[in-house]
Amino acid sequence: VPTVGRGGHAAHMEFGRPARATHEQGPARFTRARWAATTLLALGALAAAEASVSSSPPATEPLAQGVILISIDTLRADHLGYAGYPAPVSPAIDRFRSDAVAFSTDISQATSTLASHASMLTSTLVPHHGASFSKGTGLSPRAVTLGEVLQQGGVATASFNEAGQLSPEFGLGRGFDKYEATWLRHDRCRLSVEVKHAETWLRRHDDQPFFVFLHTYEVHHPYVPDPRYLSAVERSHYTGPLPALFTSIDELDRINRGLQPTNQADIAHIIATYDGQIRSMDDGFDELISFLKKRGTYDTTAIIFTSDHGEEFGEHGKVGTHSHTVFDELVRVPLLIKLPRNEHAGASIRQQVRSIDIAPTVAHFLGVASSPHFQGRDLLPLIAGAKDRARFAVSHLDSGDVSSVRTTRWKLVGSRLFDLTIDPGESRDVSDHYPEIAAYLQAQRVALVGLAPILTGPTVILPVAEQPALAALGYVNLGPHPGNRSIRHP
Ligand SMILES: [Zn+2]
């Protein structure tokens, strides 16, 4: 067996959790004293249990009063200050990082919005949930969502998001008591807007177990930052041929079709317009943290900060777009988890984890038994220091046509093998040098995709009234007909 991961059978590794009744053991009423008594004990006990058995023990005590999951659409893992990015893009997130556990390698399961969020919220791979924007299909009725699991466990659930590929027509609203998907002109997409909605809801619901899922397109193209944020992150004044204050989708389209030549300074400027949006989003994040602290709920709330996919800036021939490959600039996403009372604050976890691991972690925080359909694994034992089995990360294109399987060192993209330790840019196929590793990873991928039935979701055609807002994000959805799939930047 090649020395990748710790070996073992994929089926055993991924599907160890037994089905458990959830109704009887929904989260008990939470109190601060109770939290204090249970958190340390539970995390300590889990560390031992996870090391000795293949399945997580049932969660019976809530560790947090509530969980807030924030997904910043299109946010690269490496464009945040705490991750080493040189521009001052994320002061509030960097401060938050010192209260949180940072995962340096979190891999999303798809590189487009609908498919990736569907994986995050169902803890399944793309072929197993059926949701695909390019195919014009929503979530399969057979998929089980995190919201449904929590709702059955007595948790109040709400999502405030910016529609588009998260429109309720695609099925991601299943399991939310309130699913507020707001169509906004792209230049009005702001995390701070979604935070305001969440604050109103939290004031009425944060005395009971709750789950809030926030999403924004604020960082998504076109890049139209407020000029003051652009000047905060752009080191020198740009004097080239591109617009000085923004980057439009048409501009990116022209560049990617070879109609607009660019040099290094032009690309740096495009990146600065993207970064300016991150700096703006960071202010919205700061508002959320300030609200929770003022409200007195910061300590008892678990906060998970992540993204659905990254963005390419020339690594593999395209600029300012995503969903066209499964290379690292698109599958690597940030992941910060702040535990109640800042447990394990400042810890760093280098082991590779995946977006599908988020849902079982949220269930654990809230004391709700996870679903046997979830393919991810709870991250809390790993945080507590338990010995962890390798978490193979499988990622797909939205269409499902191309997939990758990744370990900390190796990545198989289609049939090409990359050694990430010496080739993090994934430019040299070494499958001829390491055929046994390529074969091993291929077997893992086949096993993981083979764990559940391949599902196709119901056809979704968004209302005509929503098409202009969709087009502003570079999307075209006219149904599942091949001729209508001229999506420039899905
Ligand atoms: Zn997205």
Image (cartoon, rainbow, N blue to C red):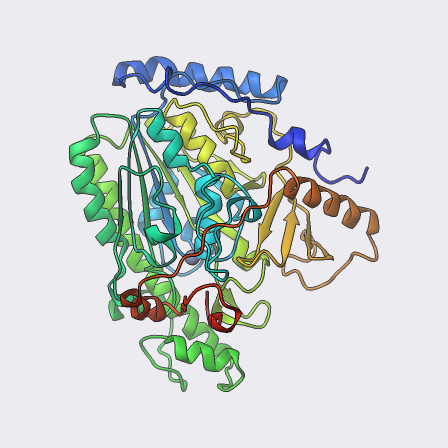
Q: Quadrant of the N terminus?
A: top right
Count of all numbered marks drawn on residues in the image: 0
451 and 239: which is toward the camera = 451
Q: Is residue 310 left or right of residue 448?
A: left
Q: Residue at x 16, y 33 (%)?
A: 204
Q: Is residue 408 visible?
A: yes
Q: Ligand 1 shows up in which quadrant of the image?
A: bottom left
175 and 94: which is toward the camera = 175
Q: Is residue 100 visible?
A: no
**In the figure, residue 461 lies in which quadrant?**
bottom left
**In the figure, residue 198 lies in which quadrant?**
top left
Q: Is residue 86 left or right of residue 400?
A: left
Residue 109 percent coordinates (x, y):
54, 48
456 and 68: which is toward the camera = 456
Q: Residue at x 64, y 35 (%)?
A: 390
Residue 377 percent coordinates (x, y):
54, 32
**In the figure, residue 336 lies in which quadrant?**
top left
Residue 254 percent coordinates (x, y):
47, 82
Q: Is residue 362 above or below residue 285?
A: above
Q: Is residue 478 above or below residue 332?
A: below
Residue 163 percent coordinates (x, y):
32, 56
